[in-house]
């Protein structure tokens, strides 16, 4: 864990080193992923079944590849009632939040008499990758499928590694209305969604987090299909004054550290005593976390405590461009208003990032690795597309035609120029 102080003469360089430190997964996966994609593309479902044996140690056939409606219903029923209620509560809030993002179609006539506009339509099909490694993630199901359903996507195909399907995951799928679930994971799942494989029809876009193999596969199939983003390790920055409870802030920092040894948690505070108290609480809480091994490695290798005036916090946050940032201060809006680069912001002492992961309603699929500088979190806009249209009568075309001819000729495209000139009567 690094300690940086704004008063140190080398602070700016030390902070730059922190910003630029790489947290790449050390595995060399590109060659494996390339071969897996090629195999699925050329062999289809036979490759999926072979990889299930090779990578997942599971014997499947074409019939057992798909999770049946009965299995979904039975699994959802096995989920504890309290968890099912929480899933329904979260699904409703996520649906409501994303439905509010729906943009309007538009049609107008401009000053030249040209009728123009745009129309929004949902994607036909989306594939959702749901990890099955470290834990069951019903929240991943909800955050990726509920917005797609709200957008009006006609087909939502969920893939998850073979093995025991957790009841909470099936309950989340049921709450979101997902009926198509396939037992396939890793790069081979991405390939199946992109190219199709036996009973799995290809989709138009793939969303959802995964390990290094899944991320590398999504990078390679982009262009054949759309993708949401290339997810990196989780990140949180907590900007906190000394009036917070240290145990609250320590828990917030560990909430991301427990995701992955490569995750990053950073505290920015102007109170040295408070910083020390938070550090002490981190060590106390690590002893009781079932995820303590991963969280401890994350905090040790990538954590940081930065002592700096709170007025400097927006500038530092923008440099980090983190996935999540909390402002646990007296006036969170004043600081948040100055921040341009963050995936999601949580304002106030009672707005921990954890509520965003589950029930706030905003999406927890967010840009990582400083991608918040140029991209946004998952939203309804990821599942719709805009088509523009132009309508001209003779008079309107007369206003646009001459400039069209001039520009086409300037670019050396005579057929373009002729297409407009003929309509102007310039045979």
Image (tube, rainbow, N blue to C red):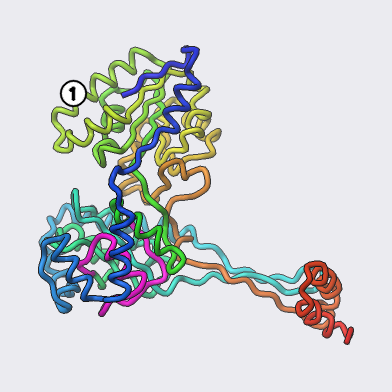
Residue lying at 37% horizontally and 30% vertically, measured from the top left:
349
* Left or right side of 70 for 333: right
What percent of the width, then of the height, locates residue 108? Answer: 70, 70
Which quarter of the rendering shows the C terminus?
A: bottom right
- Tell how many labels: 1
Residue 1 position by quadrant? top left
Asked if the stretch drawn in magenta spans residue 205, the answer is: yes
Q: Quick one: SS at disc 1?
A: helix
Residue 40 lies, with reference to residue 312, above or below; the image says: below
Residue nearest the viewer, comparing 312 with 294: 294
Residue that badge 1 annotates: 284
Q: x, y percentage for residue 77?
A: 12, 64
Residue 76 in the image: state x and y as whole percent.
16, 64
Front one among 338 and 97? 338
The residue at 43%/39% (across/down) is: 345
- Verify whether residue 108 appears in magenta: no
User: Quadrant of residue 227 in the image?
Assistant: bottom left
Q: Is residue 401 above or below residue 235?
A: below
In the picture as drawn, the residue positioned furthest to the right comes out as 426
Instruction: Indicate the quadrant where residue 35 lies.
Output: bottom left
Mark 1 neighbour density, 10 Å: few (under 14) some (14–19) many (20 or more): few
Residue situated in front as seen by the camera: 426 or 392: 426
What's the magenta region?
182-209
- Residue drawn at x 40%, y 21% as measured from the top left: 306
Q: Is 107 placed left or right of 210 in the picture? A: right
């Amino acid at each position: 864990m690094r300690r940086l102080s704004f008063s140190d003469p080398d602070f700016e360089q030390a902070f730059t080193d922190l910003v630029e430190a790489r947290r790449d997964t050390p595995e060399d996966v590109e060659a494996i992923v390339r071969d897996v994609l090629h195999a699925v593309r050329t062999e289809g479902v036979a490759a999926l079944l072979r990889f299930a044996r090779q990578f997942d140690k599971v014997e499947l056939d074409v019939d057992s590849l798909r999770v049946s409606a009965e299995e979904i219903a039975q699994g959802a029923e096995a989920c504890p009632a309290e968890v099912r209620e929480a899933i329904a509560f979260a699904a409703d809030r996520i649906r409501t939040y994303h439905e509010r993002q729906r943009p309007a179609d538009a049609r107008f006539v401009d000053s030249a008499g040209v009728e123009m506009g745009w129309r929004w339509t949902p994607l036909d099909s989306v594939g959702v990758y749901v990890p099955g490694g470290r834990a069951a993630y019903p929240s991943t199901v909800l955050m990726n499928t509920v917005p797609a359903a709200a957008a009006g996507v006609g087909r939502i195909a969920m893939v998850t590694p073979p093995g025991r399907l957790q009841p909470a995951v099936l309950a989340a799928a049921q709450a979101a209305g997902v009926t198509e679930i396939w037992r396939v994971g890793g790069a081979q799942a991405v390939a199946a969604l992109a190219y199709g494989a036996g009973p799995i029809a290809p989709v138009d876009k793939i969303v959802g987090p995964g390990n290094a193999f899944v991320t590398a596969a999504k990078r390679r199939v982009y262009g054949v299909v759309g993708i949401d983003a290339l997810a990196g390790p989780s990140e949180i920055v907590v900007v906190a004054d000394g009036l917070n409870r240290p145990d609250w802030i320590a828990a917030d920092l560990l909430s991301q550290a427990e995701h992955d040894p490569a995750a990053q948690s950073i505290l920015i505070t102007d109170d040295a005593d408070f910083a020390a108290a938070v550090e002490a609480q981190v060590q106390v809480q690590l002893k009781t976390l079932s995820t303590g091994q991963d969280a401890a490695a994350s905090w040790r290798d990538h954590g940081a405590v930065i002592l700096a005036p709170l007025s400097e916090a927006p500038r530092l946050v923008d440099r980090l461009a983190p996935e999540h940032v909390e402002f646990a201060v007296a006036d969170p809006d004043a600081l948040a208003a100055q921040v341009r680069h963050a995936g999601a912001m949580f304002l106030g002492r009672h707005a921990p990032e954890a509520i965003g992961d589950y029930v706030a309603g905003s999406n927890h699929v967010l840009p990582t690795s400083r991608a918040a500088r140029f991209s946004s979190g998952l939203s309804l806009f990821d599942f719709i597309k805009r088509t523009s249209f132009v309508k001209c009568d003779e008079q309107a075309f007369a206003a646009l035609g001459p400039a069209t001819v001039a520009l086409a000729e300037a670019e050396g495209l005579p057929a373009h120029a002729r297409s407009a000139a003929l309509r102007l009567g310039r045979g």
